[in-house]
Image (tube, rainbow, N blue to C red):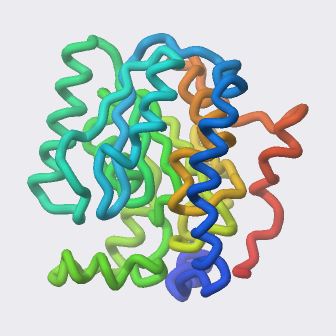
Amino acid sequence: MQAARSALHGLRPPGLVKLALEARSPWEHAGALASWPLLRLAPRGDGHCVLVLPGFVAGDGSTFLLRQYLTERGYQAVGWQQGRNLGPRPEVLESTLDLLQQLHRDSGRKVSIVGWSLGGIYAREIAKLAPAAVRTVISLGSPFAGPGHSTNAWWLFKVFNPAHGHVDADVALLAEPPPVPTTALYSRSDGVVPWQGACHDEAQLAQRTDIENIEVEVSHVGMGAHPLVLLALADRLSQPEGQWQRFSREGWRRWAYRDPSRPRGFF
């Protein structure tokens, strides 16, 4: 595991070709709307709360379509209600933790957390602080396993957070999955986050049977709206509490979702 972490420390941001491919995100959003009738065929939920956290410099508006879909599937989908996500300020994390615990108390049930990009890092860390209140965590293109400087958003992050020191110790702590069922969705064509830093490594997968990776072919900006992402979310969230199992790629899914266990590589 140490060797894998050392390799990840040298990760570089996705190249210009992948960054340019982020321009496909409007079509991915349009694809979700066009395929809405098919998306409604996904399993329905049991009514539990799902807290949805936005990515860096984004707010609840960016997760509107995702939350609408989850609401239609029978969940109580809730935004984070804190405006734009400008970085991990103490008051932001405290407020998100308070909201999680309030949802847990009011509903009397554990809450699932879905976090997009930086929001996924929040989701994982908050679940570590309050695991008794969390049912499952799902991250979407979240760079929890690599250094901050490996993303194409690092320069902008430093503009808003000049005092932030993303040191090696922080990376090691962030890479540890929370003590609840945890899913990492990632894309090898992500133009913002290097995919190797957005998924669990083989050693973690061997040690924990309640964590997993799901690979999708999608842009970073389109991650929260792509039809295959929405279908995967519906599948993961619909599992009965206490009966979590890893994602099955049987049948048509074998063609839609690539095998995340194939050689990792760095290109």
Depth order, front residue of 113/189: 189
| Left or right: 113 in relation to 261 | left
Q: Which residue occupies 70% across, 36% down? A: 247
Depth order, front residue of 79/136: 79
Q: Position of residue 220 (x, y in %)?
A: 54, 62
For residue 15, what is the image quadrant? bottom right
Q: Which residue occupies 48% across, 81% down? A: 150
In which quadrant of the rendered image does the C terminus lie? bottom right
Depth order, front residue of 84/254: 84
The correct choice, above or below, for 178 with respect to 142 in the image is above
Q: Position of residue 238 (x, y in %)?
A: 57, 21
Residue 203 seen by the camera: no
Depth order, front residue of 225/184: 225
| Left or right: 5 in relation to 47 | right
Q: Position of residue 52 (x, y in %)?
A: 37, 39
The correct choice, above or below, for 143 with respect to 124 in the image is below
Residue 248 seen by the camera: yes
